[in-house]
Each structure stands twice: as structure tokens, then as C-alpha cells.
Image (cartoon, rainbow, N blue to C red):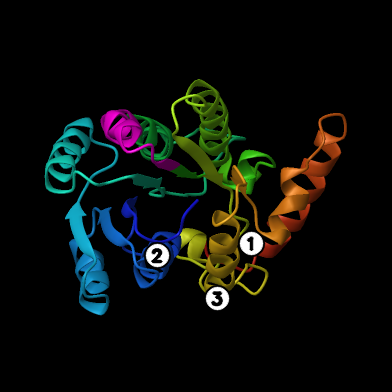
Amino acid sequence: MNLTGNTIFITGGGSGIGRALAETLHQRGNKVIISGRRKGHLDAVVAANPGIEAVELDIADPKSIQSVATKLIAEHPELNVLINNAGIMLPDQAAGTIDDQLLTSTVDTNLLGPIRLTSAFIDQIKSRRGTIIYNTSVLGFVPLALTAVYSATKAALHSYVLSQRFLLQQSGVRVLEIAPPWVRTELMNSQEAKAAMPLDQFTEETLQILGTDADEILVEVAKPLRANPGPAEHAFVNGFNEQMVALFSSISLS
């Protein structure tokens, strides 16, 4: 992917990975528009980065998606990169009764939202022979039992990416997938987690790989989880979860 001269729309750009990508891509000479539900977070990013634009968007609301898509396509006909970054991650109870609001909000935000948003922008991206990027997770390959619904949405989104990439392979549109490891962000109160990857390090490595021809954007520490093999999957996943349960036992998940 060419890392300069683009017009980029990033969802969930008010904090965490979304904000880090937005600011770094802005600094590299791209026009960046961010979105999110929290106006205060968006305003803070815009104030700190003159030139970045922001628009409020509820990724779980189809009407909000269509309204924002119509607005941005009209105002930025050169828009050629869509980064589906917005997501929520909450602990759940796969061994017991799943809270239905948690279930539906996670699926709406993490899976249906990116699919709907890309659908709303697909003709625009095709017309620019542009790039669609999805932020999934290594938990789509090795699920974290403490967040079973989140992990399942990321696995489903990875599957969707594979299909969309195949169907668009003759269109000139690139479909990329960023699969982050555990990163120090607000998700699961991980800002200070020593075992998580520093956000600035993750962003730097991710941008380096984005500048190549890779379809999957995997920082080095994510590769062992991405390579989770089929025949040995159960033992690998069980061992991973034993380690993570021990780590999260000292972190408040509420």
C-alpha cells in the first residue's frame, strides 16, 4: 500500500489503535477523517492534529452508517482508503448465561458494522481502485475464553475478509487485514499491561508492513498465534488461555 497521498476514513479513530494509525498516517501526508461515538475523544484528536477531520458515527446503527457514507463520499470524492477499526471487547460468560445486550452489541459493532460500512463505501473504493483494511485480532485465530464473543466476531470477520479479497481480486481493490496481538489500549483496561505490546511500537511495525505488498499485516509477536495449526489447535488454545487467565487475574475487567 502507498502510505502517502491518500484520503483515508478510519472508524474508531478517537483512541487506541485507531487514533495512533490516524495520527501517523496524517503525519505521512495523507488526508485523514476519523469517526467514533465519543465526540470528546474526536475533538481531542482534531485539536492535537490540525488537518484531521472527524465525524460522529455509531457503527452499530445502519442509518448512521449510511448517513456518514453519503456525507463523506460527497465531501471527499477522492476517498480511496477505508480502515474498519472500531470495535468493542468485553468479558463474557461462555460457560454460563451470556448477557444478550453484550452479545448483540458486540456482534453489531465488530462484525455487522464493518460489513455494512464497507458495503456503503464499496462503489467509492472501486472507483478509486483503493484499499479496504479490517482490524481483526489474533484472537480470531486463537480465541480468548474470557472474551468468547469478541473472539468469535474477529474469526468471522477474518473469514469475510478472505471471501471479499477473492471476489475483488480483479477489481484493482486491495483488501488487507491487520491482526493485532495484545496492545496497550483501553480495551480490557490494558493501558498498563506489561505483557501487552506498547502502542507506539505496534503502530510503527504495522505501518512498515502496510507499506509492503502483504495482505495480512502481522507484527512479529502476532505470528505464532496466526500460525496456530489445525491438528494441534485444542492443546495450543488451552495453553494460551491458561496463561491469559493467570495474567488477567490481576487486572480488573469491569
Percent from the top left, x then y, of residue 87? Answer: 41, 48
Q: As displayed, is residue 232 above or below residue 227?
A: above
Distance from the alpha carbon under mark 2 to that under mark 1: 32 Å
Residue 246 figure quarter: bottom right
Asked whether the residues under the numbered discs 3 and 1 touch, taking CB atoms below 8 Å apart as contact, a structural biologist would say no
- Which amino acid lies under the numbered mark 1 shown in the image of this protein? Phe
Q: Is residue 153 left or right of residue 19?
A: right
- Which amino acid lies under the numbered mark 3 shown in the image of this protein? Glu
Q: Nearer the viewer, mark 3 or mark 1?
A: 3
Q: Is residue 96 left or right of residue 56?
A: right
Q: Which mark is residue 25?
A: 2
Q: Is residue 123 magenta?
A: yes
Label 3 or label 1, whichever comes before in sequence order: 3
The magenta-colored residue range is: 117-132
Nearer-the-camera pick, 113 or 151: 113
Is residue 183 at least partly visible in the picture? no
Q: Is residue 222 left or right of residue 254?
A: right
